[in-house]
Image (tube, rainbow, N blue to C red):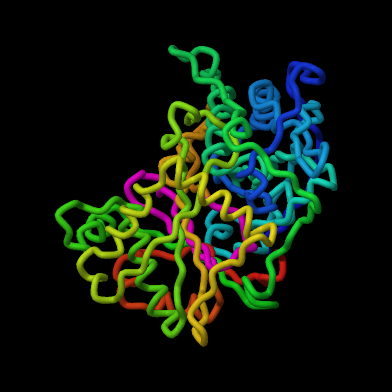
């Protein structure tokens, strides 16, 4: 049985003092609307060298010079507005030893129990009032060989793209490349609040999921499924449209069809998270750090379109329709719902509306994070306390894909038995069950 023992915990500060050097940075409207959680990610490496911890610490310290808000703390300033105080308090760095487990046993074992132990932050909810670190790292050295790097960051200050940019910067710094690249890498920008000014929050509260959204004390299964490159090419042709589907469109459509069969009798509301950085040019850029994503609802065109690429086309049209006007309208709508100024749309009377969120972490360069040693063998999402969420992550070869699902245990068992699902899924990784009441 795997056992994780904490050996040491220390604070890593920027190598150059930041106190009084940088102003506090206000959270943007979209940061305010982000889930009050930690985003967790795990990197699995097959080789461990004794010098790795110190190299990670020193390169992290250097990287925080550029990503200085990550070394700060969130404070309330004025009338309910949150700022990142860039005070250089630092990120947390934990060293741990793992005994009684191998890489393979962890990958195929009960994910929730072991993943939480491999992460520096052991909880899902982020509460700024606790003055905890915004960024934390844990290196887990296996006595059987290799190591696992766990990273936790507050969703208030970073979305998936922001986390990817930081980790790739940190990796290049550890490799000695960041300062020697020609042309030099573009610096991170903390400009989201200038584009989406924050709103006043008269009563700042950290909300857990309500029983209405998630079901009280419901068993939720978390699974990771793999689709290889060969099956991916076949899946992209399923819709039969003149324009071949992208990987994200094809896999999203597959999961949607399967979910509809599993949850027959319920009305489904499915939204896709869209990174809108390139849709706000030249105001924002790929280097803009913060929450620059928006949910776009995908219209359900009916069962008659499923075999003719209708779902894929619906996803494509909805995502391509995201522009600056849509983002601003949607953000204001979300804020009004949050503040009780507007009611969330209800389903048809007598028919439950089940809300699903689809999000993609594809093409974010996770497998480029080699830190000068080697590329990771596997990259895993460490967020456990979610429900009705589908996350897509590139396979290591960049052609296949891994599908992470969080859904009710009974529904997970049914989707695993779905004939179309089984046709394309080649393996299942890390099966486990957790209680939705965690979050």
Work out which quarter of the rendered image holds the C terminus and state it: bottom right
Q: Magenta includes 27?
A: no
Q: Is residue 162 left or right of residue 232?
A: right
Residue 40, placed above or below residue 239: above
Q: Quadrant of residue 227?
A: bottom left
Residue at point 46%, 34% (across, down): 368
In the image, farthest residue toward the front: 341
Residue 52, placed above or below residue 205: above
Q: Quadrant of residue 215?
A: bottom right
Residue at point 79%, 44% (across, down): 80
Q: Quadrant of residue 307?
A: bottom left
In x, y percent, where is residue 422? 34, 72
Q: Is residue 400 left or right of residue 114?
A: left
In x, y percent, where is residue 156? 67, 44
Work out which quarter of the rendered image holds the N terminus and state it: bottom right
In x, y percent, where is residue 133? 77, 40
Residue at point 35%, 65% (across, down): 425
Residue 251, placed above or below residue 287: below
In x, y percent, where is residue 250? 30, 58
Residue at point 55%, 77% (across, down): 409
Residue 377, placed above or below residue 371: below
In the image, farthest residue toward the left: 242
> What segment carries the magenta color?
380-406
Q: Is residue 141 visible?
A: no
Q: Nearer the viewer, residue 388 or 228?
A: 388
In the image, farthest residue toward the bottom: 350
């Amino acid at each position: 049985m795997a056992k994780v023992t904490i050996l040491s915990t220390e604070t890593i500060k920027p190598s150059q003092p930041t106190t009084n050097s940088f102003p506090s940075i206000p959270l943007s409207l979209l940061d305010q609307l982000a889930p009050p959680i930690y985003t967790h990610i795990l990197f699995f490496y097959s080789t461990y060298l004794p010098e790795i911890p110190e190299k990670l610490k020193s390169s992290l310290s250097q990287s925080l010079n550029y990503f200085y808000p990550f070394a700060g703390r969130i404070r309330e300033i004025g009338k309910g507005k949150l700022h990142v105080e860039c005070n250089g308090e630092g990120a947390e760095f934990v060293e741990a030893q793992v005994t009684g487990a191998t890489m393979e046993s962890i990958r195929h074992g009960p994910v929730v129990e072991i993943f939480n132990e491999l992460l520096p932050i052991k909880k899902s909810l982020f509460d700024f009032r606790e003055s905890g670190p915004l960024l934390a790292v844990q290196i887990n050295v296996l006595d059987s060989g290799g190591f696992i790097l766990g990273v936790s960051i507050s969703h208030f200050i970073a979305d998936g793209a922001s986390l990817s940019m930081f980790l790739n910067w940190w990796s290049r710094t550890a490799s000695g490349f960041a300062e020697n690249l020609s042309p030099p890498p573009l610096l991170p920008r903390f400009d989201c609040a200038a584009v989406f000014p924050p709103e006043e929050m008269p009563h700042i509260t950290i909300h857990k999921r309500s029983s209405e959204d998630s079901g009280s004390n419901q068993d939720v299964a978390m699974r990771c499924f793999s689709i290889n490159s060969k099956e991916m090419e076949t899946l992209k042709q399923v819709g039969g449209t003149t324009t071949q589907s992208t990987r994200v469109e094809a896999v999203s459509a597959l999961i949607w069809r399967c979910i509809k069969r599993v949850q027959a009798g319920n009305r489904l509301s499915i939204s896709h998270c869209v990174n809108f950085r390139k849709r706000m040019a030249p105001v924002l850029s790929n280097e803009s750090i913060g929450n620059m994503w928006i949910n776009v609802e995908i219209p359900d065109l009916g069962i008659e379109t499923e075999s003719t690429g209708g779902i894929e086309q619906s996803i494509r049209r909805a995502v391509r329709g995201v522009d600056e006007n849509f983002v601003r309208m949607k953000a204001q709508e979300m804020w009004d719902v949050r503040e009780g100024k507007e009611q969330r749309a209800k389903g048809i009377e007598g028919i439950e509306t089940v809300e699903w969120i689809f999000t993609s972490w594809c093409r974010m360069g996770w497998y480029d994070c080699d830190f000068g040693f080697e590329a990771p063998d596997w990259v895993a999402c460490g967020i456990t306390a979610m429900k009705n969420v589908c996350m897509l992550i590139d396979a290591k070869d960049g052609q296949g894909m891994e599908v992470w699902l969080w859904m009710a245990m009974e529904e997970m068992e049914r989707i695993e038995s779905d004939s179309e699902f089984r046709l394309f899924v080649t393996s299942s990784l890390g099966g486990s069950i957790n209680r939705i009441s965690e979050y």
